[in-house]
Amino acid sequence: MAKELGITARADNYAEWYNDLVKRADLADNSVVRGCMVIKPHGYAVWERMQAALDGLFKEHGHVNAYFPLLIPKSFLSKEAEHVEGFAKECAVVTHHRLMNSPDGKGVVVDPEAKLEEELIIRPTSETIIWNAYKGWIQSYRDLPLLINQWANVMRWELRPRLFLRTAEFLWQEGHTAHATFDEAEAEARLILHKCYQKFIEEWMAVPVVVGPKSEGEKFPGAVTTYTLEAMTQDLRAIQAGTSHNLGQNFAKAFDVTFQSAEGKLEYVYATSWGVSTRLVGTLLMVHSDDKGFVCPPRLAPIQVVFVPIGRGDERQAVLDKVKELADALKSSTWAGDRIRVHIDDREKETPGFKFNHWEMRGICLRVEIGPRDLEAYQCVLARRDDGKKETVQLDQLADKVVDALGSMQMRLYAKAAELMAANTRRVDTWDEFLKAFEGEGGAGFILAHWDGTQETEDAISAATKATIRCIPLEPHDPADIEPGTCVYSGKPSARRVVFARAY
RNA sequence: CGGGAUGUGGCUCAGCUUGGUAGAGCGCUGCGUUCGGGACGCAGAGGUCGAAGGUUCGAAUCCUUUCAUCCCGACCA
């Protein structure tokens, strides 16, 4: 295939490949405002599938949705010292509320008369505005737990944006819960981590993750514990797919949110917050896609099966009639609890070959090719996006074959990603070896190494290698990983191995 | 915020050194022939060359200023 028709190969330039992929798969575009992204219908459809699945999981565990405002009084951010330090550098600030015609007649200017009494921050996250509201909602232990989620946009003024992976404005969900005890909050943070995020990422996205707390240096500002789910991209970097925080009483104290216990005592509530964002779309792309474009796991694919009718003239109509009949039958079949999502590409001006490439680029899972010859033989050709294999199928078996193929594709994608992760996760015991692992610019997989637990060591390692501690796995790869040893950098005692990697 | 580069139809770029009033490929529109892995022919549409000022008979091209974007570093989901 000619290069100009395809996209940059992963092996040639991974970053270019990713940019090409997002654009050519018709997922998103850069906006005129730096760092902002236009999510196109096809990309948004993937996000909608993600939203639907996650929303279902949250609700299954008793959470409800609400919406809190975009604008936050500046003073709210000064209430939690650590928290503000984490976000202050990337906040957009609203200072005025009116424009006027420019005195020189050219365009509009900010009306200096319309300066706000108190400046407003465009939310980088909603902890502060939500905890201010919760203060009014919570009086008694009977008001707890409070289990609320919101789907929203947030803004963090990013200097180096990349579509989906890091944009100034992004879409996400943020859960904010309040509890009577620390243990309850801890259980909530873990519940979301495993039963919602890990389940969704593994079962829907077909992406394996390493799960566990962040180090002190990497945790969310204002959290007691931050849990993370780390995936591995095809260029062997780590990418954080989601976070769940046990916030302890930090925000309750900052916003003075107390409740009266059954014993009549006044106590600060315990909190969690947790989120995943449109970055998940970027993660999905990074993990599964190939040099022919987007590869989408069937459970998230906006279109699972595309029909490409072949033929012209009189033949064309006969083929098209049959295709409509087959597509209708397929649409009433189900897989993974949903109706199968089908599209017929009946455009007349494009050739079949063009359509094959077109839909492969966009990540449609299965393609049904059917032409006059097939019609005569009561068969069609079923092509898979993941391995490119084609199979001739009797028409009356199509629905069964499609269901089988979707299932095996979902599993195969997970297995392939898990293999890559396993093959690129290794133990390193000496500083020389560690440096060697991270020489060069690219990703080096997940390195399991001993760490003395200090911030100084973490900083020194990161300065020397650009690798950071991604995660302290809850489930060790090997029982030996949680045995004591000596720090790979300082030689001091270490309780266990942690995961180091270069990250997105 | 520091370092480097680039701004020319929708996209990728040529033209600039040596000033003479704008081109190619792709894409787009129409018609016809095609149709089992990115078809072809013919006919079209589309650009005050990032912006402002200057030099000149004449500026995409030379000079000054300015804006924007991209890449590389420090920070982040």
Image (tube, coloured by chain):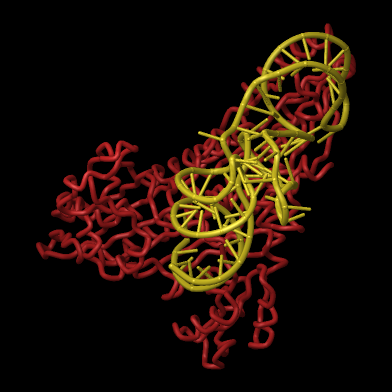
Chain colours: A red, B yellow
Can you see residue A412? no
In the picture, residue A324 is in which quadrant? top right
Q: What residue is drawn where x is 66% and y is 32%?
A: A304
Q: Is residue A365 left or right of residue A173?
A: right
Q: What residue is drawn where x is 57% and y is 31%?
A: A338
Q: What residue is drawn where x is 46% and y is 86%?
A: A456
Q: Which part of the image, by quadrant, shows the N terminus of chain A?
A: top right
Q: Is residue A55 left or right of residue A301?
A: left
Q: Which part of the image, by quadrant, shows the C terminus of chain A?
A: bottom right
- The residue nearer to you, when weighing A407 against A109, is A109
Q: Tell me where residue A471 appears, x and y as whole percent.
A: 52, 70
Q: Is residue B76 left or right of residue A418?
A: left
How many dots with numbers? 0
Q: Is residue A432 above or below residue A302?
A: below
Q: What residue is drawn where x is 29% and y is 67%?
A: A248
Q: Tell me where residue A486 appears, x and y as whole percent.
A: 57, 90
Q: Tell me where residue B35 appears, x and y as whole percent.
A: 86, 21
Q: Is residue A276 left or right of residue A297?
A: left
Q: Is residue A165 above or below residue A426?
A: above
- The residue nearer to you, when weighing A13 against B69, is B69
Looking at this view, name the residue that lies furthest to the top. Answer: A314
Looking at this view, name the residue that lies furthest to the left. Answer: A264
Q: Tell me where residue A234 appears, x and y as whole percent.
A: 68, 58
- The residue nearer to you, when weighing A28 against A106, is A106
Can you see residue A474? yes
